[in-house]
Amino acid sequence: MTKIGVFYDGSYFLYVSNYYNWFHEKKARISISGLHEFIRHQVAREEDIDVRYTRITDAHYFRARLNANDAQARGNQLYYDRVFDDILLQEHVTLHYLPLRSAPTGKLEKSMDMWLALEAYEMTLMRQFDYVVLVASDSDYVPLVRKIGALGIPVILLSWDFEYTNDEEQRIVTRTSQELLNEVSMPLAMHEIIENSIQEPTPLIEKMFVPRTPERTISRPLSLEELDSEEGQVHVSDIQNIKSGYGFINFEPANLFFHYSSLVGIDFNELQVGDRVRFTLGTNDRGDAIAQNVELLEDETM
């Protein structure tokens, strides 16, 4: 088995994902599971082995982020942070966070880079990776790459170069450190790989992006007033997805959250995506519309 360790500069990865979601024609975020599958296929090709014999045994995500109070003050930021945490945990990615208030601007980013480098080198020694994958663009990681290279372990770099104009009409340019590109064993220009796939689509690259949400569906929670509905109204729809202890029900224009404690007459573990359910509209303590008294409907054909 070929063992792979993946290390994310989280601020950089989020920046790249935002670019593809808001400014690129893809209009979609990068999928963690799809990116991991792409990495495994690249290693399999390099080793000339079946992809089944490659494994990402460790993946680590490093990022400085807002503390709970500041995130809550920014509307739904706390909710979106938690959603992304769930995605990372589902893909067995270990999270490493520092609060933004812990250091002045600039020094904190250096602290995160150093933390990533120390963890990556230590984990490489302990886990004995066959390949180390770095999702980054900063020259600060050059010493890490040299140290890992001295162990005889190849380092793959996933990086993106792009330009775009933001909403303030400012030209934003992102470039990967040439010194870092020169040091790694296998630099992968992901922007070129993705652009080539637009001309000649491949399933592997398509899986690298989260499927688009239909435009009629709003991703943020809405109040009952925004839904033009009243508390206690009864509706029938189907389960869109199920997470650990909660899920979402298809509802226009914003899918409704439900908690396992809101179920009536059925165990949460018996629910499946696509099940038809009846529910009443309610609100949580923030005033967001949610589904309550959720009960499973019998199959109409029975």
Image (cartoon, rainbow, N blue to C red):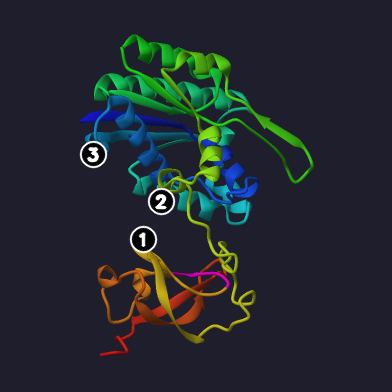
Q: Nearer the viewer, mark 3 or mark 2?
A: 3
Neighbor class of circle 3 (other Cα within 10 Å; few <14, some 14-19, many 20+) is few
Which amino acid type is shown beneath numbered disc 2?
Asp
On the image, the x and y values in percent for residue 123 come to 31, 24
Q: Nearer the viewer, mark 1 or mark 3?
A: 3
Q: Which mark is residue 52?
A: 3
Q: Earlier in the sequence, mark 1 or mark 2?
A: 2
Residue at 52%, 53% (x, y): give it.
Answer: 80
Quickly name the residue at label 2. 86
Q: Which residues are magenta?
A: 253-257
Q: Earlier in the sequence, mark 1 or mark 3?
A: 3
Residue at 59%, 82% (x, y): give it.
Answer: 229
Q: Is residue 256 above or below residue 106?
A: below
Q: Quadrant of the C terminus?
A: bottom left
Residue at 44%, 17% (x, y): give it.
Answer: 184
Quickly name the residue at label 1. 243
